[in-house]
Image (cartoon, rainbow, N blue to C red):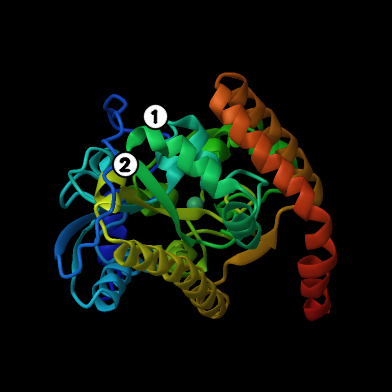
């Protein structure tokens, strides 16, 4: 598989990856669902599908995952479904993936549901919530705790069938040129951080700046911004932030396990025979597992490289800072859900599951990690 070099990576960032969850482009109107066609047995029928993504072409892990999904579907179906993958901007702009698949311009899309917050505010709860659930907990909620059913219901009017299509794992808190010793250090801080995380920074007295991916490095280097978040050690290393920033903070409280979504046009999905539908399910599930595994393995490798190759101080946010950010996060989410009934319903389900799984996570995952780090 073709890998991107650093220059391609930085340039590609400008094309859309995590360019800003709320920086939405113009949105079309709601689509009426197409008449549900009964899936006839169509053995031997061949399909040529288009897959649009919010990632630059072949983007590390995420774009590579989209390429693999297409390959797996073709392999499993013996060539009955062939999928051509388009990076963001190749067929439609990155932030029009939702509309393109909704309208049937493409049959499949790969992105993250918080990109559609401007159109469907409730959608972002299926991607990432500050101080929300991590990858393991999101998988549990969505796959076994009723979350996916809710997600399908929310996307139904848009003629879309959502699947889990990956997870970034816990992201990093970001790169800072000023130390964060107390919550007061956020006052006046200019940070590139999209979405709900940005609203939290604003509550702390900072300003959330939305720089396109391709401009973040220069803005941080020149002091146009004081801090930026991106993803984790692997992608951050490729951006070169360790060469210019002084501090690398953890954890990524704002994105504790961002789910990437695979969306399929409902009419296209229903036109498939049951065996081909099962192949789409299986390939999505494989993609979901592969992306998280790849993130974890690469982040581990590149954290070491950052530690060995740079003088960056890798620091944990102080406990009281995290506690205060958590309060601001709850306030920001409450403000959002007060304005939108659907968001309120989805967030209630999210919170209920988060509360339910907490006790179990505390005596299983948390204790086990503590044991290992001792
Ligand atoms: Ca991020």
Residue lying at the far top in this picture: please name it.
Answer: 339
Q: What residue is drawn where x is 75% and y is 44%?
A: 321
The image shows residue 44 at horizontal and vertical percentages of: 16, 70
CB contact under 8 Å: marks 2 and 1: yes
Quadrant position of the N terminus in the picture: bottom left
Can residue 273 be seen here? The reply is: yes
Residue density around tag 2, few if under 14, some if 14–19, many if 20 or more, within 10 Å = many
Q: What residue is drawn where x is 29% and y is 52%?
A: 269
In this rendering, position of residue 103 left or right of residue 324 = left
Dot 2 or dot 1: first in sequence order is 2
Residue 98's label in the rendered image is 2
- The answer to whether 350 is drawn above or below residue 299 in the figure is above
The image shows residue 209 at horizontal and vertical percentages of: 45, 36
Disc 2 residue lies near ligand 1 with CB under 8 A: no
- The answer to whether 247 is drawn above or below residue 114 in the figure is below
SS label for mark 1: loop
The image shows residue 139 at horizontal and vertical percentages of: 59, 59
SS label for mark 2: helix
Q: CA distance from mark 2 to mark 1?
A: 10 Å
Q: Looking at the picture, tell me which residue is in the foreground, 290 or 328.
A: 290
Quadrant position of the C terminus in the picture: bottom right
Residue under label 1, please give it: 119
- The answer to whether 239 is drawn above or below residue 118 in the figure is below
Q: What residue is drawn where x is 29% and y is 70%?
A: 73
In this rendering, position of residue 90 left or right of residue 238 = left
In the picture, residue 80 is in which quadrant?
bottom left
In this rendering, position of residue 262 left or right of residue 25 = right
In the picture, residue 70 is in which quadrant?
bottom left
In this rendering, position of residue 308 left or right of residue 180 = left
Can residue 59 be seen here? The reply is: no
């Amino acid at each position: 598989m073709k890998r991107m070099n650093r220059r391609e990576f930085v340039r590609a960032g400008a094309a859309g990856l995590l360019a800003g969850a709320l920086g939405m482009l113009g949105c079309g109107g709601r689509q009426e669902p197409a008449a549900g066609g009964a899936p006839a047995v169509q053995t031997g029928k061949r399909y040529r599908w288009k897959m649009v993504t919010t990632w630059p072409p072949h983007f590390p892990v995420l774009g590579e995952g989209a390429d693999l999904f297409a390959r797996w579907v073709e392999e499993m179906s013996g060539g009955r479904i062939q999928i051509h993958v388009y990076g963001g901007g190749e067929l439609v702009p990155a932030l029009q993936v939702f509309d393109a698949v909704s309208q049937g311009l493409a049959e499949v899309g790969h992105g993250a549901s918080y990109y559609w917050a401007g159109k469907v505010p409730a959608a972002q709860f299926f991607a990432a919530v500050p101080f929300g659930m991590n990858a393991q907990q999101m998988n549990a909620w969505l796959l076994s705790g009723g979350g996916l059913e809710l997600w399908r219901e929310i996307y139904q009017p848009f003629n879309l069938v959502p699947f889990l299509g990956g997870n970034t794992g816990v992201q990093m808190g970001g790169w800072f040129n000023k130390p964060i010793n107390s919550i007061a250090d956020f006052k006046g801080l200019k940070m590139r951080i999209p979405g709900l995380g940005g609203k939290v920074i604003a509550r702390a007295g900072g300003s959330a700046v939305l720089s396109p991916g391709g401009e973040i490095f220069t803005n941080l280097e020149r002091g146009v911004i004081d801090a930026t978040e991106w993803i984790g050690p692997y992608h951050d290393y490729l951006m070169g932030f360790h060469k210019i920033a002084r501090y690398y903070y953890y954890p990524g409280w704002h994105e504790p396990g961002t789910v990437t979504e695979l969306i399929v046009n409902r009419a296209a999905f229903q036109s498939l025979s049951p065996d081909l539908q099962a192949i789409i399910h299986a390939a999505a599930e494989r993609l979901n597992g592969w992306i998280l595994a790849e993130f974890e393995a690469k982040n581990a490798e590149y954290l070491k490289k950052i530690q060995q190759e740079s003088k960056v101080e890798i620091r944990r946010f102080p406990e009281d800072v995290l506690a205060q950010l958590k309060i601001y996060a709850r306030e920001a989410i409450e403000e959002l859900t007060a304005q939108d009934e659907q968001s309120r319903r989805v967030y209630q389900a999210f919170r209920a599951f988060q509360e339910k799984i907490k006790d179990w996570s505390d005596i299983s995952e948390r204790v086990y990690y503590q044991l290992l780090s001792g």
